[in-house]
Image (cartoon, grey):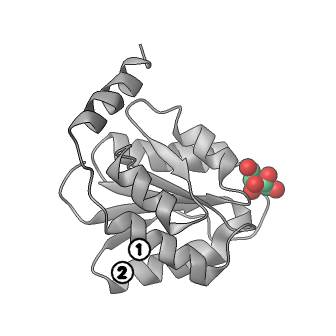
Amino acid sequence: MTDTKRIVLSSDHAAIDLRQAIAKHIAAKGWEAVDIGPTTPESTHYPEHGAAAARRVASGDCSLGIILCGTGQGIMMAANKVAGVRCGVCSDPFSARMIRAHNDAQILSLGARVVGEGLALDIVDAFLETAFEGGRHGTRVDMITALEG
Ligand code: RB5
């Protein structure tokens, strides 16, 4: 992870309102929120938005990312296809801390039809406030990377 406080946000049509609430929330905490949309409610395709956010992280343009769809699952699957990216779906703050501390996930995925705004913001805070622990977890993360072939 780079040291910049620049974080990419994207979603499909199912999560526009929650994504924009999160962008506002993290900007108030000093993050540069790079919100790559979409902004209109037409039905769209979550793989495109997951990949676009993941590429911003993989390239180093953004240090972290937050992506959303209805469940958080489909967009997470797409993001994890981009080499070097680790993304997990979280519906609770404990899991959000753990995907940073143990898995060095750079991207958090949320389901806008699963979690309400208050819980989502707590999950986001847990994700952003936790650092990777390294050590034995680093060995395991390296093993994940090696699976990319
Ligand atoms: C869109 O209806 C829905 O399938 C999508 O937001 C997401 O939940 C997919 O995983």
The image position of residue 1, as x and y in percent, is 25, 48
Q: Say if mark 2 contacts mark 1, CB within 8 Å.
A: no
Q: Is residue 44 visible?
A: no
Mark 1: which amino acid?
A: Asp
Q: Is residue 31 visible?
A: yes
Q: Nearer the viewer, mark 2 or mark 1?
A: 1
Mark identifier at residue 110: none
Mark 2: which amino acid?
A: Ala
The quadrant in which residue 7 appears is bottom left
From the image, tell me which residue sits under label 1: 125
Residue lying at the far left of the rendered structure = 3
Residue drawn at point x = 61 percent, y = 39 percent? 77
Q: What element carries label 1?
A: helix
The quadrant in which residue 5 appears is bottom left
The image position of residue 42, as x and y in percent, is 78, 64
From the image, tell me which residue sits under label 2: 27
The quadrant in which residue 147 appears is top left
- Quarter of the image that includes the C terminus: top left
The image position of residue 49, as x and y in percent, is 59, 50
Label 2 beta carbon within 8 A of ligand 1:
no
Judge whether 118 appears above or below 54 on screen: below
Residue lying at the far front of the rendered structure = 136
Q: Earlier in the sequence, mark 2 or mark 1?
A: 2
Q: What element carries label 2?
A: helix
Residue drawn at point x = 47 percent, y = 33 percent? 82
Judge whether 102 appears above or below 113 on screen: above
Left/right placement of residue 132 relative to residue 143 reads left
Crowdedness near tag 2: few (<14), some (14–19) or many (≥20) residues, C-alpha within 10 Å: some
- Between 56 and 120, the one nearer to me in the picture: 120
